[in-house]
Amino acid sequence: MKLRTIWNVCMGVAMLGAIQGSEGGVAGGEEAFSRLMPVPQELVAGEGRYRIDKTFTVKVSGNPDERIYAAASRFLRRLDQRTGLFLPQDYVEQGEALEAAGLEIVVSRPGSVTLGEDESYRLTVAEDKVRLEAETDLGTMHGLETLLQLLSADGNGYYFPGASVTDYPRFPWRGLMIDSARHFMPMDMIKRNLDGMAAVKMNVMHWHLTEDQGFRAEIKSYPRLHELGSDGMFYTQEQMREIVAYAADRGIRVYPEFDVPGHATAWLVGHPELASLPGPYEIERGWGIFDPTLDPTNEKVYEVLEAVFTEMAAIFPDEYFHIGGDENEGHHWDKAEHIQAFMKERGIADNHQLQSFFNKRLLVILEKLGKKMVGWDEILQPGMPTDIMIHSWRGRESMVAAAKDGYASILSNGYYIDLMQPASEHYRVDPLPADIDLSEDERARVFGGEATMWSEHVTVETVDSRIWPRTAAIAERLWSDASVRDVEDMYRRLDTIALQLEEHGLTHLKNREMMMRRLANGYDTEPLRVLADVVEPLKIYRRNADLSYRSFSPYTLLPDVAVADAKDARRFRSQVTAYLETGHASDKQAVQGMLERWVANHDGFVRLADRSPALREALPLSEALRDLAALGLASLRGELVEAKAVLARAREPVAKVELQVVDAVERLLAP
Amino acid sequence: MKLRTIWNVCMGVAMLGAIQGSEGGVAGGEEAFSRLMPVPQELVAGEGRYRIDKTFTVKVSGNPDERIYAAASRFLRRLDQRTGLFLPQDYVEQGEALEAAGLEIVVSRPGSVTLGEDESYRLTVAEDKVRLEAETDLGTMHGLETLLQLLSADGNGYYFPGASVTDYPRFPWRGLMIDSARHFMPMDMIKRNLDGMAAVKMNVMHWHLTEDQGFRAEIKSYPRLHELGSDGMFYTQEQMREIVAYAADRGIRVYPEFDVPGHATAWLVGHPELASLPGPYEIERGWGIFDPTLDPTNEKVYEVLEAVFTEMAAIFPDEYFHIGGDENEGHHWDKAEHIQAFMKERGIADNHQLQSFFNKRLLVILEKLGKKMVGWDEILQPGMPTDIMIHSWRGRESMVAAAKDGYASILSNGYYIDLMQPASEHYRVDPLPADIDLSEDERARVFGGEATMWSEHVTVETVDSRIWPRTAAIAERLWSDASVRDVEDMYRRLDTIALQLEEHGLTHLKNREMMMRRLANGYDTEPLRVLADVVEPLKIYRRNADLSYRSFSPYTLLPDVAVADAKDARRFRSQVTAYLETGHASDKQAVQGMLERWVANHDGFVRLADRSPALREALPLSEALRDLAALGLASLRGELVEAKAVLARAREPVAKVELQVVDAVERLLAP
């Protein structure tokens, strides 16, 4: 194979742009190179195109784990579903006697779904053959995703562009935490998100299973935990095993979190005797930090924890086990006389030390079960052994401190996707930026990171639209070279992967349409869509600053239809930038078109809200958008306008969302 | 409460129209009466409106089954999700001390989820209170669905219009058969469709669990059945129990079908010794009628069947049990010498008698288990006792014959929703039309009917769009009075319920959008949508006449995006009718607008197909639509045109779909 162009990711997207430019057509071969997400470590453009026709088959050789056969079969189905070729191979099977397969997968040894396993792969597309080689089947599964992303079309049909890809992850821990506790997430949601994770080469699902609002795991030895602590919404042990197996088939580790001693109200509904203060306790329906706390002085607490951890250890084979440990403010400890007496007796100076005492008891249990303890920042207390792992959520400082003290760590600070920040914010967060003050050894203890989908303000209807596509940007940060950091380029690729992710049944795009249909009460959704495309939900923790939301609140309104990266707002900001830089008439026209659309939209929105009272709270927002857009138009016409009041009003949050085009309009006004 | 108008459904929709007209506004109170589906037996319009505000609560009294509390809680969540009121009640609970509840539910006794249970209810909406009374909680659950359909809005917000509804089903058996065997259907699909069934007051799910293409039930005593017969896609016993409980919570019976002795290839993969001819056998991947058949002369066959039925009887409490029995052509019986010898020895004259012999053995097993046998037409053989039930699929004749012979029966002939006929076809099928030649007693033995979702040509992505909304039309046929039969009115209401059904997670609308996005390869879907909105998949059994489809074929192409009632085709036919009747300029304009749109669409479709090769096979169709529309436009201009070739071409099936606007254009051409 003759090599034509080398694209090394360290050279960034400029080179890629050149390749793309040289090819021209949108459906041209190398265009696919610029769609890859996460960007591979090295891509060498090859000559020619491998044509996919209806005889295309897949063959596996070498010594893989048997999961590769199902993975290759799934690959074939997805390829067939996209191309409509009616491919002949029902299943890729072991020992199949295939003559010339279009794709040959060669694996050296069975992969182990454990931290640090080799996930690298080499993919070569030549005119006559596609070859995917890897040390383990885990690597080849990543390669299959890359190959599907390379699928291209031209006048002659579908093809894979000639290329040679050498790829491997930057970090070994690329995770997504799913909070099934605050809002329960059905099996189907977990499965389709595991598929989505695999599509962007993530390899860890952290399963947050207990909270003040729910205890979601069946515990056979203490069934009152899930029976009374879950409103009947929990995973049976069979179901949890099913998820672990489903994930392992996709090269994804699953490890559970049982958050203790705080965040534990749901444990206490069925077992009030485990609490620091007398019960009874009820499942918490509100959001926030609550006081109910396990009693570290009570031996039964350790009995129950040992029983729970033992049952779960049999289900989750991963060596890591998360015990939470966050946000225990110790108010109930302070109030409990017997706990105060216990502390005094043992010389335990404060609640931090008491929690450390508690954690050390858990450590003994987990060690017996062969598990490594993971906990949030707060578990890092003097005297904890260095074989625990710190999950950093409060800031990078704790991660750095942990690494310096000899602890392994992963980063979630900066990856809190529940905060509804744009993808660009998360994308910029690097667990190990070049200037970090850590030695080589210390850096090696930073394993990677996890996007965290806390579920206060998501339901099964909206959760996918919070996870995707933003999590793909985080996945790229954790897989690709640190030099891959062009935000605009990331957004371009994110738009593509958002569409591809739909084939796993993910609902991030389609549920939004459905929710708008419901919110429009059966009427035309267009005025709602125009508004929804320029607003974003209140960010960080402002959405529930007034404590209006609870478990069963209607998460079906404008802030739930809105997403973290408002589509038209992003487009408009680029248009304004282009216009202000170039002054071109066409750029001006684009800006003007958007502004006119917003002015015109208000009347339609008023009519719609008239028929759908649930939209009425957003009327002032629609009006503010109209006035803002009118301001922009006046400015385009060169009129001097009094802007202050209009801008201020447009910046006011309304109906739990905010307009995302105010700054851009203000830029138009600048003298 | 003063009564203003009485609407008795026997008077048809004319009266209803009058009520509606008197109110005027689209969001006006009584407009909701004309949205109800199925139409209730009696509705009396009341005075005033019950205003729903954020204090709205629900109280249950009387002596219900506890399922009503969960049902009432679900009702509250749906109401809240539509209105965004942030209702205060988390759960409706037994023994709750509520003061003045907005809705009071009064139940006389716990309902039993068995055939013939009282499902009637009385719903009264007054200005100050909503009251829902019923003999059983099953009735009140139907009433809750009616109440949600009555939800209305005006300038003051949400309300229920004053009304008094007395309602009960015409038939006690209103079913949907789901074929989980040919294409496996995940748990989530079953659950959301049970919710959909409940929304339109259906009460039976018939679960087709075995086929040539798959054995989908975990059988503990003979695990090779599901292990080797399912590609790993089966329901565990825990999962089947979960479905039975989920359905019972919604007042829906679930009974299984184990189709024997034909349609049984998947049984034989793990147990070839049960076959009439020696194996080995493989899971069937094609569609059609296949020869592998259980051996009725082999005692082990009855041992296995008894074991299977016994395990299933413990999971499905329903008194009915379906043994299939259809389409056994007996080819393998003819070829098996030992079977021929057996028949000769016993004086069994033909294969019909042999199947009757087989069925009688099954009858003994089922009687021991306390189950009533159900089977397709073919089980009706001389000598079968009259306590079996006939499931009529081949024609109404078998149902009539069964009734005359003293057998109970249900009708599915006419309700085969897999055949992709329009809703109107199914709607016109009445199990007991007025002119049917049956006595009162015989009529009483016709229990109702079942829509049958055979799954050759559906996948989990498309199945909801085949079931819904058409099944709502069948549900109405089986619930409402026989006089409710206005097709246009049905379609109007069907459009509304299609939107409401989305709140159960049903994907009939949203997956279509997703599939178009995939099919358009990420480009603008509009030209595809325009075409898809006037085509329907090939109907009856023509789609696979060339045997091109198999289990793993890509059901992701144009016929899968198309639905049985092409939206724009239906609209266009009405427009043409209106124009030909009135000759009005505005009607002409509507027709002309559609035609112009189709002419203009072709260029866009060509460009799209250029980028998405999977669409290329539809190019001749898009062209035929363009030419057809041009013909219509020429005719509107009064030009004489040569139409024959264009019409003939437009009638040709292309890419497994057909244009549905050819007749309407032809009507425009008539001199």
Image (cartoon, coloured by chain):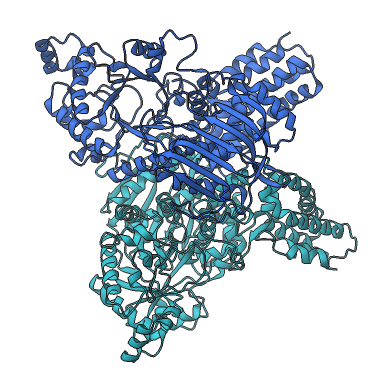
Chain colours: A blue, B cyan
Left or right, B100 with respect to B175, comes to left
Which residue extends farthest front? A1
Q: How many marks?
A: 0
Which residue extends farthest left? A345
- The x and y percentages for residue A507 are 51, 40
Say above or below: A605 vs B239: above
- Residue at x 28% of width, y 69% of height: B304
Which residue extends farthest right? B639
- The x and y percentages for residue A461 are 46, 39
Choose between A459 and B477: the one closer to the eye: A459
Left or right, A263 with respect to B211, comes to left
- The x and y percentages for residue B640 are 90, 64
Say above or below: B208 vs A539: below
Choose between A273 and B184: the one closer to the eye: B184
Q: Is residue A631 visible?
A: no
Q: Quadrant of residue A402?
A: top left
- Residue at x 16% of width, y 28% of height: A301
Instruction: Name the image quarter holding the C terminus of chain B.
Output: bottom right
Choose between B192 and B187: the one closer to the eye: B187
Say above or below: A12 vs B590: above
- Residue at x 29% of width, y 15% of height: A380
Left or right, A175 with respect to A362, comes to right
Choose between B638 and A499: the one closer to the eye: A499
Q: Is residue B579 visible?
A: yes
- The x and y percentages for residue A297 are 13, 21
- Residue at x 44% of width, y 32% of height: A119
Say above or below: B643 vs A496: below
